[in-house]
């Protein structure tokens, strides 16, 4: 070391570099080896770069003999060890191709030095990694995993891990047998090789479902679970990260649960692991919990209790992952919801819904929304003060939080008092905003919430006043069928008042409602014809229903609709026939015969509405004669019974 410093001080480096360029083969060899020994300190490496050593050293790697290459690679290793910023310059000097060649055909020392250099170059960035891949590095690196020394295997594993920045690279590594060899290292490698192999497997699993499948096929899951049992801390952390990623694959989650008690080990780490292990265990359980069988196993191992405790006392990141796991668990089964309630988790979730971490807020909100699906939990959630923070998230949260808050508030609107609290808390304008600008899922939540809170005249008036009717009507024309059906369902809940009916008409609601009268969805058809019944009770709206083509589908419902559809269609025609100027159009659409059929064979409500419609139509003498001719004596008898005898005495 002292000798190297003297060489630097005496400015011999420039002379050595000159020998690299113009010396004999032996001089080049000795000069390169000397520079390699000099480059073992930061100050000496700085001097090598300042004197312009990079280009001639790279030239020796490219075109020198074996001895030249040994010395040049040693010198370059020192430079890239201490001079991170110069690695890109070395790559630009086209050193990658000869390094890859040495990994394939060099001596044992050259392979070790070359793969070590490639590993450091792979850390520079995407351009450097792309160049290493372009030069075909993966097959020789995988070959080192198969036949290299322990040190070569160790560094090759790290290099392959660094190169795996997308699914295509992972697929190429797997195609060349890399994953099979890494799994073998998990079983038979040294401690350091197991650590590196588990880390690489975790990286591949995070990039590619194909890699996850290959890892499982080669028996990697059971070996990763075994590392959770007996590995050192670094191995456990890498195994946890790998299982966390593999658990995102639906087909492999159950294998994690069944292999050697994987779920039990993860739950145990929630309790006894270090901070990073707790964090990763919670994330792995969260990914796995979306399968019902795995979710049940987590509950069986008292995982809900451990996750709630982590919510209570963990680090911020642990709380985020625990909330993620709980949100998936409660979405799967009522039993998990009950377990969260029993562990006093609801007050904790409500408290954390106002945490500064947006990730934690989002996971907690989704968990609360799932908990509200079970009506037995709603009273507890409301009594613990959930409405106020949910309204706050609906008002000022990000898009996802607003949508989730809308879903939870809709589920919680189980009585008039809660509906009033939600409406008075300013929910309606925010729900209207979601209907206009939210994602489809969030629009669906907002529609449900509006429909649920519209429990009285005051709230319905507020819905009109706050501009929520227009967005609901707009969604009747959505290309998303689920949204359309939800919109007509929401409109059914809020359309009972005069103000609401007029607003629906003014917002253009009649044409899409008429389309629903011929839809395939019976539930939507039921809602649409009921809304039409309410709309047609307002004389100023009736002409629009006829003008927009509503009569034909209404008459069709009289003939072939369900019982409730026939009843409401007859009610609409009864209302429309109250406007004498519409009577002839109703008759021309063929309404008389199906109305008479309802009088003969319909239910009492259907008969009442049909008699009312025909009675109204009978005010027109010509129509009255047509009814009598079509109906015969049975209709006259029915009319006599209905109490409208005076019509026939005066008309027929």
Image (tube, helix red, strand yellow):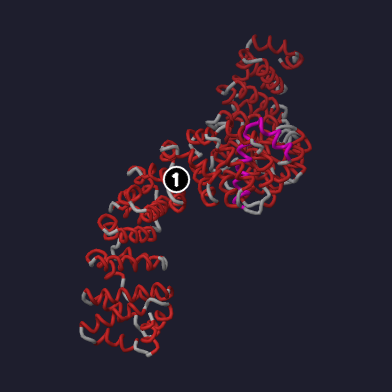
Q: Residue at x 21, y 85 (%)?
A: 24
Q: Nearer the viewer, residue 250 or 111?
A: 111
Classify 10 Å Cα crowding around label 1: few (below 14), some (14-19), many (20 and above): many
Looking at the image, the residue that sits furthest to the bottom is 10
Query: Magenta stretch: dominant SS?
Result: helix
The quarter in which the C terminus is drawn is top right
Q: Would residue 14 be seen by someone viewing this image from the given angle?
A: yes
Residue located farthest toward the right when viewing the structure as drawn: 458
Residue drawn at x 28%, y 83% is 31
Q: Nearer the viewer, residue 173 or 404?
A: 173
Q: Secondary structure at mark 1?
A: helix
Residue 431, by quadrant, is top right
Q: Position of residue 284 (x, y in %)?
A: 49, 45
Residue 631 position within the rendered picture, expressed as x and y whole percent measured from the top left: 63, 14
Above or below — where is 587 with respect to 139? above
Residue at the front extreme, as displayed: 2
Q: Is residue 295 magenta?
A: no
Instruction: Assess whether residue 369 is covered by the magenta stretch.
Output: yes
Across and down, in percent, residue 187 comes to 34, 47
Give the extent of the magenta segment: 358-384
Residue 105 in percent (x, y) is at 22, 65
The residue carrying mark 1 is 228
Figure label count:
1
Q: Is residue 624 left or right of residue 440?
A: right
Give the quadrant of residue 403. top right
> In the drawing, does residue 454 fall left or right of residue 129?
right
What is the quadrant of the N terminus in the image? bottom left
Side of 328 where 544 appears, left or right: right
């Amino acid at each position: 070391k002292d000798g190297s410093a003297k060489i630097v001080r005496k400015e011999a480096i420039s002379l050595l570099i000159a020998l690299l360029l113009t010396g004999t083969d032996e001089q080049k060899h000795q000069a390169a080896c000397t520079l390699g020994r000099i480059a073992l300190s930061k100050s000496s490496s700085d001097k090598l770069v300042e004197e312009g050593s990079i280009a001639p050293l790279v030239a020796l790697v490219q075109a020198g003999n074996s001895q030249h290459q040994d010395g040049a690679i040693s010198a370059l290793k020192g430079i890239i060890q201490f001079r991170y910023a110069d690695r890109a310059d070395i790559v630009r000097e086209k050193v990658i191709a000869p390094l890859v060649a040495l990994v394939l055909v060099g001596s044992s020392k050259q392979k070790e030095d070359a793969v070590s250099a490639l590993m450091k170059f792979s850390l520079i960035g995407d351009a450097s990694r792309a160049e290493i891949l372009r030069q075909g590095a993966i097959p020789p690196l995988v070959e080192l995993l198969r036949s290299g020394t322990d040190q070569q295997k160790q560094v090759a594993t790290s290099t392959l891990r660094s190169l795996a920045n997308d699914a295509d690279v992972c697929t190429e590594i797997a195609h060349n047998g890399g994953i099979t060899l890494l799994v073998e290292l998990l079983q038979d490698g040294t401690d350091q090789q197991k650590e590196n192999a588990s880390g690489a497997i975790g990286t591949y699993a995070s990039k590619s479902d194909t890699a996850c499948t290959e890892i499982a096929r080669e028996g990697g899951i059971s070996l990763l679970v075994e590392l959770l049992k007996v590995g050192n801390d670094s191995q456990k952390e890498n195994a946890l990260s790998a299982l966390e990623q593999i658990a995102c694959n639906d087909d492999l989650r159950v294998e994690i649960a069944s292999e050697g008690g994987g779920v039990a080990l993860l739950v145990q780490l929630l309790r006894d692991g270090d901070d990073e292990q707790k964090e990763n265990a919670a994330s792995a359980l969260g990914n796995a919990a979306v399968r019902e069988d795995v979710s049940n196993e987590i509950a069986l191992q008292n995982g809900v209790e451990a996750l709630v405790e982590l919510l209570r006392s963990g680090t911020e990141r642990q709380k985020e992952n625990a909330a993620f796991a709980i949100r998936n668990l409660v979405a799967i089964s009522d039993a998990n919801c009950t377990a969260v309630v029993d562990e006093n988790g609801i007050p904790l979730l409500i408290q954390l819904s106002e945490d500064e971490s947006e990730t934690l807020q989002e996971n907690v909100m989704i968990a609360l929304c799932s908990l509200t699906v079970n009506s037995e939990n709603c009273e507890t959630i409301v009594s613990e003060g959930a409405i106020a923070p949910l309204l706050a998230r609906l008002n000022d949260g990000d898009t996802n939080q607003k949508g989730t808050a809308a879903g939870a508030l809709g589920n919680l609107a189980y009585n008039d008092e809660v509906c009033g609290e939600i409406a008075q808390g300013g929910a309606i304008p925010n729900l209207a905003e979601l209907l206009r600008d939210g994602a489809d899922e969030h629009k669906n939540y907002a529609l449900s919430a509006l429909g649920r809170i519209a429990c009285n005249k005051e709230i319905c008036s507020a819905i009109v006043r706050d501009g929520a009717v227009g967005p609901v009507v707009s969604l009747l024309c959505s290309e998303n069928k689920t949204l359309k059906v939800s919109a007509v369902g929401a409109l059914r809940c809020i359309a009972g008042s005069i103000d609401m009916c007029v607003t629906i008409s003014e917002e253009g609601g009649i044409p899409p409602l008429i389309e629903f009268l011929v839809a395939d969805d019976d539930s939507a058809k039921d809602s649409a014809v009921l809304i039409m019944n309410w709309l047609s009770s307002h004389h100023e709206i009736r002409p629009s229903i006829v003008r927009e083509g509503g009569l034909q589908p209404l008459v069709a419902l009289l003939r072939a609709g369900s019982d409730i559809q026939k009843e409401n269609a007859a009610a609409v025609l009864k209302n429309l026939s109250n406007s004498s100027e519409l009577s002839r159009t109703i008759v021309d659409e063929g309404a008389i015969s199906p109305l008479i059929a309802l009088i003969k064979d319909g239910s009492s409500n259907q008969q009442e509405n049909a008699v009312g419609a025909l009675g109204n139509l009978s005010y027109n003498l010509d129509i009255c004669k047509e009814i009598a001719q079509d109906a015969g004596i049975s209709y006259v008898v029915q009319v006599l019974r209905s109490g409208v005898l005076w019509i026939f005495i005066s008309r027929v």
